[in-house]
């Protein structure tokens, strides 16, 4: 099974830059998109399903903001928006689907960089997520968490760790959260196969034209619970794929 996650920074914009051809070329079994920036009724029918048998969208109440969508060749047993906290579902941040052998979380994590209110919102989200996942793991579930985490974990995951250490997404408390998340029993699939890889990023600032010089951040992940780690076959960052300020991330399991 191949799973791909991609923050498309607007599905309609990405569709004009090769999204459908990318899907044909990669042929994923499950595709998870973040930051769709649209309600399903706002897009053309072919974009609603992207050719998959099953599709589910979770959109923010605010138009043109946030949003996630999950596309599958085989329909999941169950799918829902988050785990019941309206402050997150109102922003279209989570789709939780149950598949044969694992639960999948497609998440667009909050960005805390626009002020104290959003910083605190993000910290609460991170704490609530870990509490929820811990409870699910204790039930014996296999779990895959994909998406734009908006957190870079290690110094090797950003192009300038000293300068960026005070920036949202690479703050000490966010990096500590990532430690705690992995300690719950998750494996960062990219690092599982590429433990020492440097200068492998998944996001580059448009404003700084950062992709040209590869001044990026690795903030998009596919993490799996320990029960699935032995089934990992390969994982990669598809950093030559354009169409967004993020690139896709993939795993085969």
Image (cartoon, rainbow, N blue to C red):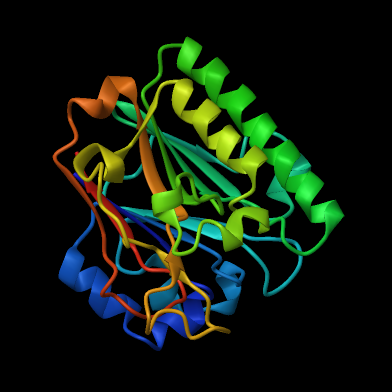
Q: Nearer the viewer, residue 206 or 7?
A: 206
Q: Can I make out residue 7 in this image? A: no
User: What residue is drawn where x is 37% and y is 75%?
Assistant: 214
Q: Nearer the viewer, residue 150 or 90?
A: 150
Q: Residue at the right extreme?
A: 117
Q: Does residue 195 sit above or below 219 in this rendering?
A: above
Left or right, 153 with respect to 126, comes to left
Q: Residue at the left extreme?
A: 233
Q: Can I make out residue 3 in this image? A: yes
User: What residue is drawn where x is 56% and y is 54%?
Assistant: 150
Locate the C terminus and report the quarter of the image it occupies: top left
Q: Quadrant of residue 50?
A: bottom left
Left or right, 230 with respect to 221, comes to left
Give the image location of residue 245, x and y in percent: 47, 75
Give the image location of residue 13, x and y in percent: 49, 84
Q: Quadrant of residue 114?
A: bottom right
Q: Does residue 14 sit above or below 233 in this rendering?
A: below
Give the image location of residue 157, x and y in percent: 42, 53
Number of on-image labels: 0
Q: Nearer the viewer, residue 111 or 155?
A: 155
Locate the N terminus and report the quarter of the image it occupies: top left
User: What residue is drawn where x is 49% and y is 58%?
Assistant: 69
Q: Nearer the viewer, residue 205 or 77?
A: 205
């Amino acid at each position: 099974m191949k799973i791909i996650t991609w923050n498309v920074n607007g599905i309609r914009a990405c569709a004009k830059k090769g999204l459908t051809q990318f899907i044909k070329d990669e042929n994923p079994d499950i595709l998870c998109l973040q930051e769709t920036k649209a309600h399903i009724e706002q897009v053309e029918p072919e974009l609603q399903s992207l050719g998959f048998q099953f599709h589910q969208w979770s959109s923010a109440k605010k138009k043109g903001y946030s949003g996630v969508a999950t596309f599958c060749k085989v329909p999941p047993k169950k799918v829902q928006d988050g785990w019941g906290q309206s402050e997150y579902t109102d922003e279209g941040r989570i789709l939780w689907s149950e598949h044969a052998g694992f639960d999948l979380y497609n998440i667009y994590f909050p960005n805390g960089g626009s002020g104290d209110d959003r910083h605190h919102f993000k910290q609460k989200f991170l704490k609530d997520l870990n509490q929820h996942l811990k409870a699910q793991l204790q039930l014996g579930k296999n779990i895959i968490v994909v998406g734009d985490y908006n957190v870079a974990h290690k110094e090797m995951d950003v192009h300038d760790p000293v300068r960026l250490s005070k920036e949202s997404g690479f703050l000490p408390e966010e990096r500590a959260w990532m430690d705690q998340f992995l300690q719950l029993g998750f494996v960062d699939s990219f690092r599982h196969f590429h433990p020492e890889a440097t200068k492998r990023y998944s996001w580059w600032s448009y404003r700084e034209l950062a992709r040209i010089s590869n001044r990026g951040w690795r903030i998009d992940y596919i993490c799996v619970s320990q029960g699935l780690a032995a089934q990992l076959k390969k994982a990669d960052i598809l950093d030559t794929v354009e169409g967004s300020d993020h690139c896709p991330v993939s795993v085969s399991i």
